[in-house]
Structure formats: structure tokens, C-alpha cells
């Protein structure tokens, strides 16, 4: 009960911070002790999803919202989120669904090309700076009683201009 409430409150605080970032602030933490700030807005219109994305995919940041691995300026982006809060909608994503990512540089639109379950102990995501791609990653299965485990659900999307 506490985690979903914390996640929802954090999105509200991050929205305020995001508006500061878009206005040119270089340091706009969503709360005074935060060591991160929003760097993007992730939207999946078909699923009614609009979420702020934090810099740095540490476990601490993931408690508050989806977070990007590495920098948001990368062309091959990996965004992680918890399966039971912000990324619960991934289970409903299908090939062809549109996802957009707004940064301070503008909006990029992607189309889902695959959804798959991978074992993180046997396979790792390959980040290729020469590829423009968005990967959304969460733990799997969605209805697991215990957190953790090696399985990951990965939604891969390519820019719509390349399709």
C-alpha cells in the first residue's frame, strides 16, 4: 500500500520539477534531498500513461518512478521501472503501440516492435550507441509475490521515422 502511494506522490512532485527543467533550470530536484531530477516524460497514449523519467536507474530512484540507464541524450535508451507500479502497463503493450519520449531537446516517437521475457542471468541488454532504440525493462512475472528474480520483461521500440 505504501509503495504505490509513494510512487504517485513522487510523480506529482517530479511534474513540478520537470516544469523547472523545461524552463532552463540545471538543478531542479523534486524534493530538497533528492540526488536526481526528471529528464524526460514517457507517454503511452493507448494505455493512458504519462510518467516522468528520472536520471539514474538506481534502486532508490526506481522507488519514485521510471529511470533511465546512462544519459537521456543516448540514442539507445534503456528505461527501467517497477512491474507493480509505474511499469505495470508494460504487460499490455503490443507490437505497433506508440510510445513517445519528451526531453528538453524535443519529442521522439517510437513504435513497439517486440515484447519478450529474458533471463538476466543468461542474457544482457546490449547498448549500441549506433542504434536509435528505446527499451523499457521491468521484472517478470508481473504477478509475482516476491520481488527480484532473474526474469525481465523487455519492450523494444524503434523510432517511427525508421519504420
Image (tube, helix red, strand yellow):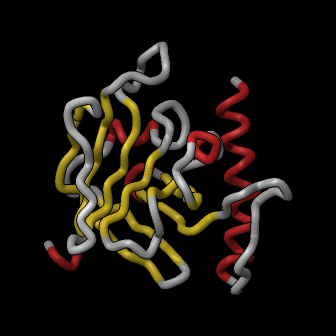
- Of 129 and 41, the residue lying toward us: 129
- On the rendered structure, is 109 left or right of 43? left
- The number of numbered badges drawn on the structure is 0
Quadrant of res 12: bottom right
- On the rendered structure, is 131 left or right of 144? left
Q: Position of residue 42 (x, y in %)?
A: 48, 61
Residue drawn at x 72%, y 57% as measured from the top left: 35
Quadrant of res 29: bottom right
Q: Name above or below for residue 144 compared with residue 56.
A: above
- Of 34 and 155, the residue lying toward us: 34
Residue drawn at x 51%, y 30% as measured from the top left: 84
Q: Name above or below for residue 155 compared with residue 4.
A: below
Q: Which image quarter is the C terminus in?
A: bottom left
Quadrant of res 23: bottom right
**Residue at the farthest left position:** 163
Q: Position of residue 155 (x, y in %)?
A: 28, 48
Residue drawn at x 40%, y 67% as measured from the top left: 100
Q: Position of residue 37 (x, y in %)?
A: 67, 63
**Residue at the farthest right position:** 32
Residue drawn at x 75%, y 70% as measured from the top left: 28
Q: Which image quarter is the N terminus in?
A: top right
Q: Position of residue 78 (x, y in %)?
A: 37, 56
Amino acid at each position: 500500500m505504501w509503495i504505490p502511494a509513494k510512487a504517485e506522490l513522487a510523480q506529482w512532485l517530479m511534474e513540478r520539477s520537470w516544469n523547472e527543467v523545461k524552463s532552463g533550470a540545471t538543478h531542479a530536484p523534486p524534493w530538497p534531498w533528492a540526488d536526481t531530477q526528471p529528464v524526460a516524460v514517457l507517454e503511452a497514449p493507448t494505455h493512458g500513461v504519462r510518467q516522468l523519467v528520472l536520471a539514474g536507474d538506481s534502486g532508490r530512484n526506481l522507488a519514485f518512478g521510471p529511470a533511465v540507464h546512462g544519459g537521456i541524450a543516448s540514442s539507445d535508451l534503456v528505461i527501467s521501472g517497477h512491474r507493480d507500479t509505474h511499469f505495470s502497463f508494460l504487460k499490455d503493450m503490443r507490437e505497433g503501440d506508440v510510445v513517445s519520449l519528451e526531453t528538453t531537446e524535443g519529442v521522439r516517437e517510437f513504435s513497439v516492435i517486440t515484447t519478450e521475457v529474458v533471463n538476466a542471468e543468461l542474457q544482457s541488454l546490449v547498448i549500441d550507441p549506433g542504434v536509435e532504440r528505446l527499451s523499457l525493462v521491468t521484472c517478470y512475472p508481473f504477478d509475482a509475490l516476491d520481488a527480484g528474480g532473474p526474469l525481465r520483461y523487455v519492450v523494444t521500440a524503434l523510432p517511427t521515422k525508421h519504420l
